Amino acid sequence: MIKVLQFGEGNFLRTFVDHYFNTLNEEGGEYEVNIVKPIDFGTLEKFDKQNNVYHIVLRGVKEGKAVEDVYEITSVKNAIDPFVDYDKYIALAKDKDLKIVVSNTTEAGICFNGADKMDGFDGITFPAKLTKFLFERFSAGLDGLYMMPVELIDNNADELIKCVLKYIELWGLSAEFKKWVEEENYFCNTLVDRIVSGYPRDEQTKAHLTELIGAEDNLVSIGEPFGLWAVEDKGEISKYIKDGFHGIDVVLTKNIKYYKKRKVRVLNGSHTNLVPAGLWLGAKTVDQCMSDAKLSAFLENTLKEEIIPFVSDDIAATTEFANSVKERFLNPYLNHQLISISLNSISKWRARDLPSFSDYYAKNGKIAKYLTIGFSYLMCLYTSLKEEDGKFYAYLPSGKVEYKDDLPYLKYFAEGGCPIEFMKDEAVWGEDLTKYEGFAKAVEENIKAIKAGENLL
């Protein structure tokens, strides 16, 4: 038995990682996924009611024909709430069959907070929780683990171990433990690629899926057929992670940087830059954006002029990948909601678009036109935020929608915060964005134009 600890119960992990391990089980493997809820928010009630069994539906177009493939996922054996049952969570640390740790705590999840206490749990960062978990395993005299974070930041595993080592120093843990973490555990950078739209929002789709599955499933999740998982090849990971096609394409590689950069910049970067403009102009889904001439041209121009040239020297190969991405964006069956993609837009723009923006500026000595427009729509959206009954709403021309991001960002704008001052905050962006000559002025002018009813596309 190979056990997997999965930090996160969201749609993506269930439609991607758990599908992969489920496929390995169908091929004769013995994998058991143990989901752990990483934050106190939300409940695992749906998992309890369905005995951790659910379905995914992969919807797309193959050879011009609509495809809807249903998969029953039985690889999840436990869904643990450590805020309620901490002992069950820690028991995993002492389980000799545990080999793999997977996480998806958003781009903002892998971070260090010097105020975190080792005797705490609620409110401390994910790396702090992982450090405590690894210390329990070390204290039990067990072997190390393979850490496979899927958060979409550069060198996600490298950043994770940096945080873990900082907590070891902060909490004064032993040199022996530090050595064990560094020498007996493998932190493997990863890249994941599958568009997941998750649980259907409209009643018609819900009814259709219920009929398709043959029963109501409150955990059902929709994704596209395409799936790629590139994993850094370290230690003896090939004993546990099988490459080749297993529901998704898995690549064990020593050079993951190209896969990561290509996917994050081309797919995620174009997504993130498109969404605020799409929302402001009344679109609700990605395929609606792609069917709109101006929004589609905006995406095309952003990719061609400001993203593709800075991924690698092989422009043709990156262009080919970008063309496949545009085809995936046109998949109407995903019903990929823009408001869902907009979750944590600030950290997403920093991770996915700022690197391309910076590269363009360094080469051309001027700001990138289309990325600037996308950022302007993003700031316009945030400056429209209002807090009502503890929730935050963006007031768009088409109406208000609930908006979610880190609470300090939401409060800043809901209380009338200035977008230009926000651009200067190095804690938010990792640098002062106003240092790019002309950027602040362009954003300020663009916001005024957008709010005056002008379409910048």
Image (cartoon, helix red, strand yellow):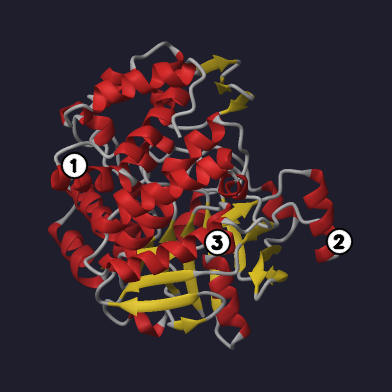
Q: CA distance from mark 1 to mark 3?
A: 29 Å
Instruction: Give the SS element for disc 2.
Output: helix
Residue named by callout 3: 328
> Which residue type does callout 1 highlight?
Tyr
Give coordinates of residue 83: x percent, y percent: 52, 42
Image spot of residue 253 (x, y percent) = 30, 77
| Residue lying at 24% horizontally and 72% vertically, measured from the top left | 184
Q: Is residue 291 above or below residue 257?
A: above
Residue 333 position by quadrant = bottom right
Q: Which is nearer the N-term, disc 3 or disc 2?
A: 2
Density class for disc 1 (Cα within 10 Å; few <14, some 14-19, many ≥20) is some
Residue 83 seen in this snapshot: no
Q: CA distance from mark 3 to mark 2?
A: 25 Å
Nearer-the-camera pick, 385 or 105: 385
The amino acid marked with disc number 2 is Glu
Mark 3 is surrounded, within 10 Å at the Cα level, by few (under 14), some (14 to 19) or many (20 or more) other residues, namely many
Q: CA distance from mark 1 to mark 2?
A: 52 Å
Q: Position of residue 222 (x, y in %)?
A: 66, 58
Q: Amino acid at mark 3?
A: Arg
Mark 1 or 2: in front is: 1
Secondary structure, mark 3, is: helix
**Circle 2 is placed at which residue position?**
211
> Residue 186: x percent and y percent?
27, 69
Q: Are marks 1 and 2 in contact (CB under 8 Å)?
A: no
Mark on residue 361?
1
| Chain-order first, disc 1 or disc 3 | 3
Q: How many marks?
A: 3
Answer yes or no: is residue 154 visible: yes
